[in-house]
Image: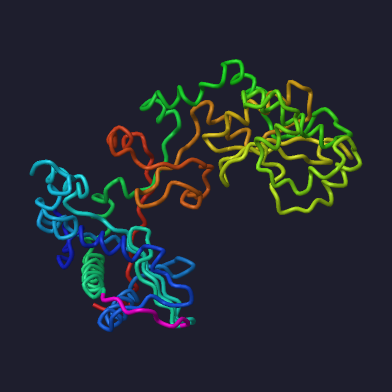
Amino acid sequence: MSLPFDISEKLKSVQVRHYVEWLGRDSHCGYGFAFGYDEKSYRLIDELFQMLQDVETDDEDGAKELWLCARRGTIDDFAKQYGTYEENLKDGTVKNQKEYEDYWKSEFPDEVEWYRFVAVEHTDIKYRCVFLSNKQVLEMDKRLESGYTHDISEFTEWLVDAVKLTIEAVRNGTYNESVARLLPYKHRTGVITRAGLWKLYPEEKESFFEALTQEDVDEFLATGTEDCTGLPELKEMTANDFYRFCALGYAANNYDGQAFAPKAQYYRHADGRDDGLKKIDPDSAEAFADWLENREKGGHPWEVCRGGNSTHVSLYVGLGRVAEGCYHLALAAKSYGRCVEAIKFYLALKHAGLPVIIYGAEFIKKRLLGLERVGIVPNEVMPFYCHSRFPGEDVDSFRHLNHENPDAEIALIEWQPIKPVKLKENAHE
């Protein structure tokens, strides 16, 4: 790939990756100590942040963001980090020269690699940090004692040179247009409809609906709600009632252990941190009401189908929304991998005549209809908890561009515009 602006030739992408992986490891962050650098690097870092004074920012933390580039280089550059052909042949990594060349190209498929560079400085506390490809590669905190010195001058020289050339490209007007046109899609952010994904990957749709009948889908589309209006009244409730309600959901989802008592099923499938629920009289409505109001708290009694932070099913018990002194039940599970269980759980409780709602009902309906918007995030970003990348949008599922089928996906994705970089009016020439 030819670029309309100059990029640094001081390091090739294989070397840049080495430094990003090394410096980006959490193990290099000492407890109470700052990661130490050589004196030359400290001078270069000063120069780097001095140059960045010219870059405008509207970020609340003052972060300055640029896209830097490095060339892939030759197979000899690759050999310096990944071993020579002879070394890889000896250890069995490759069987012949072609496999070695394929290995090189598979690790570094692009002639030019792009790196998202972000720098933050807080002069009041004398703190600086630099991120590259979403990994923190430099950190200077004058409040901490410096640890063992590491010579990274080769890397900091490249950073300074790369940033200098990039700022020059901004100044001469070639940078923003080039990034908007040439930045690989694997580094971009966008949205695609669930229907679009299902069209490309019908097996995903088949898997999603495998446990749902068309009758289930139609009923949920017609009745799924998070509005308590018109729900039946549940004036009393006990711990055993709660366990029984959970067992209805477990049965609807064909969970194991259905021969056990409802309480045993709950402790088999739930999180288990029950805020003392197991200690109360299981058949006393007064005991349950008192527990609900005054329980220990800090546990997860409502996590009735355990999972991760965002991949579990919750069944909450609420009071007063249907009618004064009446209970209601509320399912919650928006995650793509668990919402089918929540749908079946909801329908089972509804069929039992219970006052039940489900949070995110309209969102789940959009998912069933294929109208959900799925976030596509850059390869260097873990596709979890990326909601802040989609302000004003109800996006809850995230994934990377499929490297095996990129063109088909790219055509269906609505890409976010890339924010242009601007220099301050009084920037140094």
Q: Residue 322 in the image: x percent, y percent?
A: 82, 35
Q: Residue 416 in the image: x percent, y percent?
A: 39, 47
Residue depicted at 54% across the width and 42% down the height: 394
Q: Does 127 sit above or below residue 106?
A: below
Q: Which residues are magenta?
A: 143-151
Occupied quadrant, residue 250: top right
Occupied quadrant, residue 54: bottom left
Magenta stretch: includes residue 149: yes
Q: Does 244 sit above or below residue 15?
A: above
Q: Main secondary structure of the magenta part?
A: strand
Q: Does 161 sit above or below residue 418?
A: below
Q: Does 7 sit above or below residue 363?
A: below
Q: How many marks?
A: 0
Occupied quadrant, residue 34: bottom left
Say which quadrant the C terminus sits in.
bottom left
Query: In the shown orientation, is residue 163 left or right of residue 379?
Result: left
